[in-house]
Amino acid sequence: MHDVAGWFKRSQERIYSATAPLAEMEISSRLTAGTHAVDVPAEFRGLEELLLSGPYPAANNDEAACAVIVLRPQAGEVTVLPQTWYTANKCDVGYQWITRVTRDPANGRIIGGGIRIRNFELTEDGMHLRGWIDEA
């Protein structure tokens, strides 16, 4: 049986771990599009890049409701890439969502997939849908 990780902030999420984290950091979901300096704990600086996806505060149904977050610990920076194609008018936000993103080693573009969303490839700027990836 694993211990409940009680050091995490109060949340409805259930997170389990057998050990305490070596370090923690937060990235605000309110960061604007673009690159921002962040304080990265030394324990994370061995990572070259980490891609995440998460909700993005849309002011209306035509604005991005999700963003890809590119964390570069060695550089001490985070880049927020609002997904202009993922809007309430184009997707069923809450029923469809992006769950995974990574960088295609062949061309450097971000690719991903999600719940009720086909696998996709983004444009070079990382904010627009280049196309859907056919599953073989």
Image (cartoon, helix red, strand yellow):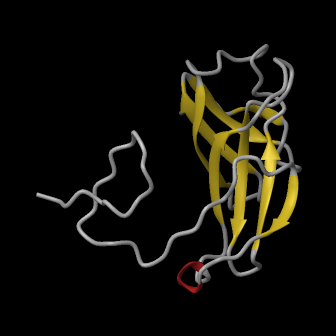
Q: Can you give x and y, in whole percent of width and height, for residue 25 in the image? A: 58, 68
Q: Quadrant of residue 4?
A: bottom left
Using the image, determine if residue 92 lies above or below residue 105.
Answer: above
Left or right: residue 130 versus residue 18 is: right
Towards the viewer: 103 or 47: 47
Q: Can you give x and y, in whole percent of width and height, for residue 24 in the image? A: 51, 70
Left or right: residue 120 versus residue 100 is: right
Q: Can you give x and y, in whole percent of width and height, for residue 37 in the image? A: 81, 71
Q: Most extreme residue toward the left, as rendered? A: 1
Give me the residue at 11% from left, 57% from top.
1
Towards the viewer: 53 or 118: 53
Q: Can you give x and y, in whole percent of width and height, for residue 19 in the image? A: 27, 72
Using the image, determine if residue 50 lies above or below residue 118.
Answer: below
Give me the residue at 48% from left, 76% from top.
23
Left or right: residue 58 versus residue 71 is: right
Give me the residue at 65% from left, 15% from top.
92
Q: Most extreme residue toward the front, as rendered? A: 10
Q: Quadrant of residue 12?
A: top left
Give me the residue at 31% from left, 60% from top.
6
Using the image, determine if residue 41 lies above or below residue 110.
Answer: below
Q: Quadrant of residue 11?
A: top left
Question: What is the total number of numbered labels drawn onto the structure image?
Answer: 0
